[in-house]
Amino acid sequence: MVKVAVIVGSTRPGRKALDVARWVMDAASQRSDASFELVDIQDFKLPLLDEPVPPSMGQYSKPHTIAWAEKIAQFDGFVFVTPEYNHGTSGALKNAIDFLYKEWNNKAAGFVGYGSAGGVRAVESLRLVMGELMVADVRGQVMLSLFTDFENFATFKPAAHHGQSLTAMLDQVVAWSGALAPLRKSAG
């Protein structure tokens, strides 16, 4: 069975990403075509990238990097929950992604963005990063507005129509994760 990580892409105090990721997990838990796991980058306490050798070399030397690599290697696909900060993703998420290389390869990714413009620009910047890491990003995405999907800009209350977008994106991530399995096996 396909295994998908729902990655909480913010470590900021007062972050909204955890609430959004739990909403994704609630929807994902209703599915029988894949297993889903919440992965919070905050739990890994990654410093700014501190590996002396580029991640593409696969020579991780720090315990936090090794733990992060072991976790990410377990998955066939990802759903990145990202805030939009200054037209891009969070520095914490970009840093966490940059720690690794082969653990991302030949897998699929979908995105749930939130912000004043629905997180669209954060997702667009992540799509470029995914291409470099040989991650196939799916078309479907969820765009949540701080103005309409968060009561008083704080309490997450998504509009009902986002459920359809979420289902479509999860369908694509699961399908693509399965379709890429032969590439992962041959690269293994």
Image: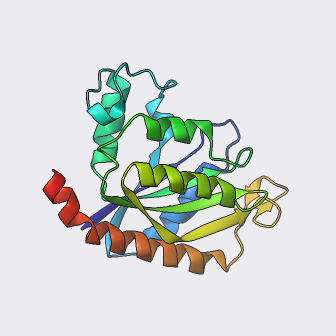
Residue 140: x %, y % from top left = 53, 73
Q: Does residue 159 sit above or below 63 in this rendering?
A: below
Residue 11: x %, y % from top left = 60, 37
Residue 109: x %, y % from top left = 43, 61
Q: 179 and 43: which one is in front?
A: 179
Q: Is residue 19 visible?
A: no
Left or right placement of residue 36 versus residue 149 in this view: left
Q: Does residue 26 sit above or below 135 in this rendering?
A: below
Count of numbered circles on the image: 0
Residue appearing at x 58%, y 76% in the figure: 165
Q: Is residue 56 visible?
A: yes
Residue appearing at x 39%, y 49% in the figure: 133
Q: 172 and 8: which one is in front?
A: 172
Residue 27: x %, y % from top left = 50, 71
Q: Quadrant of residue 56?
A: top left
Residue appearing at x 34%, y 23% in the figure: 53
Left or right placement of residue 181 versus residue 166 in this view: left
Left or right placement of residue 138 versus residue 143 in this view: left
Left or right placement of residue 53 versus residue 45 in this view: left
Which colouring convention does the figure follow? rainbow
Residue appearing at x 31%, y 51% in the figure: 105
The N terminus is located in which quarter? bottom left
Q: Does residue 136 sit above or below 73 in this rendering?
A: below
Q: Quadrant of residue 102?
A: top left
